Amino acid sequence: MEDGSVDSSKVSRSIGSYAIGVNEAIVLVSSFVDKHIENEIVPMTLVKGIQDGFNGVETNYSLEDAQFDLTTYYADLNKKAGEAFLSKNKENPAVVETASGLQYKIFEEGNGVKPNTTDSVAVYYVGRFITGEEFESTIGLESPVRFSLFQVIKGWTEGIQLMREGAKYRFYVPYTLAYGEEGGGPIEPYSALMFDIELVKVIKYQPNH
């Protein structure tokens, strides 16, 4: 054919099905790579699950069971990955670990005041997963983000109190000091996280008189 169209008569049902399978496998493997779990998958078991699901095989294993197990499996992988990352990360001589398990690295010290738990702060920050993938950033905004230290995750409440105005730190936050067992938004359960924070200003608490 000369118009660029595909002559379907030249592609058998078997070859077409195989081509679809290859294409879908590439997409699936890519999603595993994105999650850094490509080495955790048992291919033959995965294929068996696809076959059973495709053929509508009746088992005692419901869709709800599968979704629950999948969520639990991913959460367990996140937990193990976070623990392994933080364990190795603390070997870096530039990294300090506190009693709570929070880790941090100083990029630049400030010379202003330190905040207390009751104070508000104005900051610029970048949030990343331990893979380095960025999930949130305020860099480029006209003004820094302002919030009270008692309104944020525990890792921020503790970590920002270590800083002085003008400081730039990187925090490595275990899931227990981040979004915990539930996660939230793009943050999956049991996720350890990294944050680059610049403390622009401390707004001291003023009690009402």
Image (tube, grey):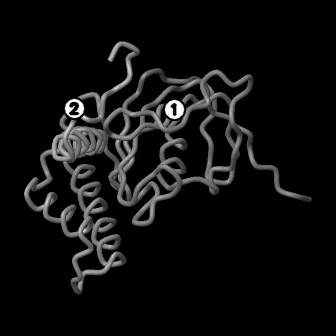
- Toward the viewer: 130 or 14? 14
Label 1 SS: strand
- Toward the viewer: 209 or 77? 77
Between the C-alphas of marks 2 and 1, the distance is 53 Å
Q: What's the amino acid at mark 1?
A: Val
Residue 65, given in percent of the width and then of the height, sits at 31, 78
Residue 9 relative to residue 167: left or right: left
- Toward the viewer: 4 or 167? 4
**Residue carrying label 2:** 10
Label 2 SS: helix
Could you tell me which residue is drawn at 69 percent across and 25 percent down?
Answer: 141
Q: What's the amino acid at mark 2?
A: Lys
* Residue 163, label in figure: none
Residue 60, given in percent of the width and then of the height, sits at 23, 86
Q: What residue occupies the far right of the structure in this picture?
A: 209
Crowd band around label 2 with a 10 angstrom C-alpha radius: few (<14), some (14–19), many (20+): few
**Residue carrying label 1:** 126
